[in-house]
C-alpha cells in the first residue's frame, strides 16, 4: 500500500507523520502531458471510511462474483484464536491478539498459483511488520497512560478482468493504527496467468511507457466530472483542476490502474483508475474510481497488446 498518514493523537487537523506500509500497493507512473480532450466514461466512489472495518467502493468491480461463499469470492478466514496466525487452504490469512487484528483474503486459487503467490507472501510479510509496530505502539500507549488501541488491517484482493492470458486484480486495504480515523488504500496487480510475470499498465504502452497525453487528459476530464458529481466543484483542495502544463495539479502518479472487463469476450474494455483519499482531495471526499474506455488509449498501446482491447466496459462493471 502507499504511505498512510497517521495521527496518533486526537486532532485530525494537525500535520501527520508517515507510517510505512506495504509496498505492493505502490504504483508510480511518470506523466507525459499534452492537450487533447477525449470523451470518457466514468464511475465514481465517494465514501467516507471513518470507522474501523469500513471498506470502500461498491464501484470497485470484479469480473467474478464477490459474494462470500460463492465461486470466485475471496477466501475469508475464520477469526483465529488470540495470538495465532491462521492461513487457510485457499490462502486467506488471519491473526488476532490484543494489539492487532489482521486479515487478508484472496480470490480462489491453488497454493502454487503464480499470480496469487506473491500477493500472499506480501501479505504475510506485512503481517509480521504490523505485529511489531502494533505491539510497540500498544506498549508506548500503556506507558504513557493513554488509551490502548488495537490496530486493525483488512486486505481483500479480487480479479477485475481476464483476457488473452493476462489477469488484473484490485486490492483494497483498510488500516486503523490508533489515529483520528482509518485509511483505505488501493493496490493493483497485472500479470500473465501462466507464469505470474508481473506487468504494469505503463509497461503496456508505447514509446517511453508513460501515459499518453490522450490518457492523461482522459483521466483528468473524468476526474472533473466525478468531482462535480461528488462535491459540486471541479477542484483539488479548492483549486481548479488543471490537467496539463506546469501548473497541473492532477498527479497521475498518485493513481493506480487496473484493467477492466469488456462487452466482447476475452477482451479488455478499458481501465479502472483509482485515487485514494488525500490524493486528489480531502479525506472527507473519500476515494475516487474512474473508468476510462479503451478507445481513449488503444492506439497508444504496444502492438502486442492492442488486439486485447476492444468493446466497452459493461454497465454493471462501470457503476
Image (cartoon, rainbow, N blue to C red):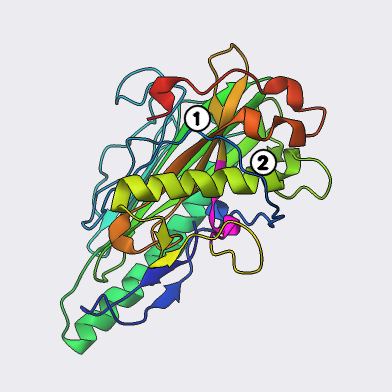
Q: Is residue 133 left or right of residue 8?
A: right
Q: Which mark is residue 201?
A: 2
The 10 Å Cα crowd at callout 2, few under 14, some 14 to 19, many 20 or more, is many
Q: Quadrant of the C terminus?
A: top left
Q: Is residue 76 above or below residue 162?
A: below
Which region is colored magenta?
250-257
Residue closest to the eye, 154 or 282 = 282
Q: Position of residue 290 (x, y in %)?
A: 47, 41
Q: Is residue 262 left or right of residue 99?
A: right
Residue closest to the eye, 70 or 44 = 44
> Which is more N-terminal, label 1 or label 2?
1
* Secondary structure state at the residue bearing disc 2: loop
Q: Is residue 272 left or right of residue 74?
A: right
Please give the name of the residue rendered at 48% of the width and 51% of the height, measured from the top-left corner.
Answer: 124
* Secondary structure state at the residue bearing disc 1: strand
Q: Which mark is residue 160?
A: 1
Please give the name of the residue rendered at 37% of the width and 78% of the height, measured from the top-left corner.
Answer: 16
Amino acid at each position: 500500500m502507499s504511505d498512510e498518514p497517521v495521527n496518533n493523537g486526537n486532532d485530525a487537523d494537525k500535520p501527520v507523520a508517515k507510517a510505512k506500509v506495504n509496498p505492493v500497493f505502490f504504483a508510480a507512473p511518470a506523466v507525459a502531458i499534452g492537450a487533447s480532450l477525449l470523451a470518457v466514461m466514468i464511475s465514481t466512489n465517494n465514501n467516507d471510511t471513518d470507522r474501523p472495518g469500513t471498506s470502500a467502493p461498491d464501484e470497485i468491480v470484479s469480473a467474478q462474483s464477490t459474494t462470500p461463499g460463492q465461486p470466485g469470492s475471496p477466501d475469508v478466514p475464520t477469526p483465529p484464536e488470540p495470538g495465532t496466525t491462521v492461513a487457510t487452504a485457499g490462502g486467506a490469512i488471519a491473526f488476532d491478539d490484543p494489539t492487532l487484528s489482521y486479515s487478508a483474503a484472496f480470490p480462489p486459487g491453488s497454493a502454487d498459483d503464480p499470480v496469487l503467490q506473491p500477493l500472499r507472501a506480501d501479505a504475510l510479510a506485512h503481517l509480521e511488520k504490523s505485529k511489531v509496530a502494533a505491539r510497540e505502539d500498544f506498549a508506548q500507549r500503556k506507558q504513557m497512560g493513554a488509551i490502548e488501541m488495537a490496530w486493525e488491517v483488512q486486505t481483500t484482493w479480487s480479479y477485475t478482468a481476464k483476457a488473452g492470458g493476462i489477469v488484473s486484480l484490485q486490492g483494497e486495504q483498510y488500516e486503523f493504527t490508533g489515529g483520528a480515523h482509518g485509511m483505505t488504500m488501493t493496490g493493483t496487480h497485472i500479470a500473465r496467468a501462466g507464469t505470474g510475470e508481473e506487468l504494469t499498465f505503463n509497461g503496456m504502452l508505447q514509446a517511453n511507457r508513460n501515459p499518453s497525453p490522450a490518457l492523461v487528459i482522459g483521466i483528468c476530464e473524468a476526474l472533473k466530472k466525478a468531482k462535480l458529481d461528488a462535491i459540486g466543484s471541479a477542484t483539488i483542495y479548492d483549486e481548479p483542476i488543471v490537467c496539463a502544463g506546469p501548473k497541473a495539479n492532477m498527479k497521475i502518479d498518485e493513481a493506480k490502474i487496473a484493467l477492466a472487463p469488456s462487452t466482447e469476450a476475452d477482451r479488455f474494455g478499458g481501465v479502472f483508475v483509482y485515487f485514494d483519499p488525500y490524493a486528489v482531495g480531502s479525506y472527507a471526499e473519500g476515494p475516487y474510481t474512474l473508468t476510462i474506455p479503451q478507445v481513449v488509449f488503444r492506439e497508444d498501446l504496444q502492438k502486442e497488446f492492442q488486439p486485447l482491447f476492444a468493446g466497452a466496459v459493461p454497465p454493471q462493471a462501470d457503476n
